[in-house]
Image (cartoon, coloured by chain):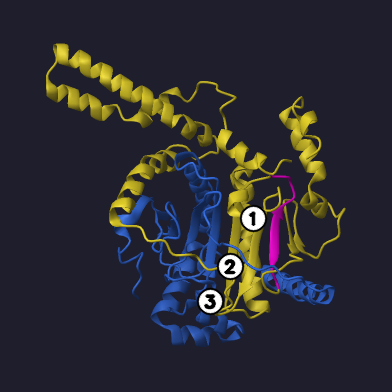
Chain colours: A blue, B yellow
Amino acid sequence: MACDVCDGILKDHIIYENNELIISLAANTSTSGHLQIFPKEHLTIMDQVPSNILKSMAIAANKMSMILFEVLKVHGTNIIIQNGVPAGQTINHFSVHVIPRRTDDGLKLDWDMKQATNDSLDSMQRMISEGITLEDSNTQNKTTSPAEVVASQEIRQDDSNAAEEKNSEKKNNYWLKSLERIP
Amino acid sequence: MPDEIDTSNMSAEEIAELQKQNCIFCKIATKQIPSKVLHEDDKAICILDINPASEGHILIMPKEHYMILPHIPDDLLAHMFDTVKLMSNTLLKTLQCQGTSIFIANGMAAGQKAPHVLIHVFPRKENDGLLELPKYEMNAEQADKLKKTLKPYFEQVFNKHTDIKHKKKIHHIEEHEETAKKDIADSKKEHKKEKDYDNQKEHDKEKKPIKHDAKQDDKPKKDSKNVNLDDIAKLFGG
């Protein structure tokens, strides 16, 4: 599978690399100093990223922020994850963006806020709370040994049909596929 | 804030306490202000945003009062990102959206509106136009220059100092660069007097600023510690 990160297309942009993470200048820059952090392993969306790697990425993103504060003297940073193509993910490799911000830089990294009605908040609260309980128990039942994570990825990549059959009890399988779709 | 004059005589702890008392999100965390709580544990709480970007917009916040992200200890941040993953997966499955955005604003310039760290997680659908990263053209030369500027700091922070204290260390890099340059200049003079050129070059190579930094960072400099971060935090005015 073609991947800008794994195929080394971003090689010249890399600032720091260890056995877990790659930090580089962003593939598609939003402002000078825009950085991106990737897991070294090919992982497409957040669901696939093992907890320990996601945690290292978060801590690294925070440190990257601080470096930008100190070195580029920026006034703030945005830390953004685009999880899935509809969220704006352009590379099929999971990443965390760290975007330096300066007062009056004119970047629009915001959204129009809506006023939610009490009814809609109530129904959302009900749905999501139930969803969390379900998801939480699923996560805890899953063994998260790195070997199994790797194995599950191999299944996804090499033999997606067989994997689908195997996971047929996973009723929400389709959303994973839609997320992994490449633009 | 009206109590700005009072704070000038207050200790950092007292100011922090005052900010904590006035923080809406701390009151939400302690349930003094009602909210739509989705999930909570001893460290973090997840609520629905009453001004959502899209239906199902979740705010994850630490129960403890932290104004900006760099103030948060690593283990708490790590814990919060476990929650982020849980929330994101829940949204994807429960609301059957096609993607999620995770957004943190760090400082007012970045659009941070409340003096309490918040992580936004909200559902995305194709062409919803909610959070698009703008494009900025950077030529190869600029990129190269930026890379060269940042690289030594990354090497230092990620290779040597894994704990949060590195903030102080980075802060001094620049003055050390100055001293290092001076040292190099001085040593050059000496070398010219008595040694040959090759030796001098070797010496220059060894005198990279970072080495100086590592040597000197034990010096207590309370005042200059975290200057930039606190400036960013102070923008909220308590």
Above or below, B235 against A93 in this view is above
B71 or A143: nearer the eye? B71
Residue B87 locus on image (x, y percent): 66, 67
Q: Which residues are magenta?
A: B56-66
The disc placed on residue A91 is none
Residue B56, position as x, y percentages in the image: 70, 72
Name the front one of labels 2 and 1.
2
Q: Position of residue A80 (x, y in %)?
A: 54, 60
Kind of residue sitting beneath label 2: Ser
Q: Which residue is mark 3?
A: A86
Q: Is residue A99 magenta?
A: no
Q: Secondary structure at mark 1?
A: helix
Q: Secondary structure at mark 3?
A: helix
Q: Chain of mark 1?
A: B
Mark 3: which amino acid?
A: Pro
Numbered disc 2: secondary structure: strand
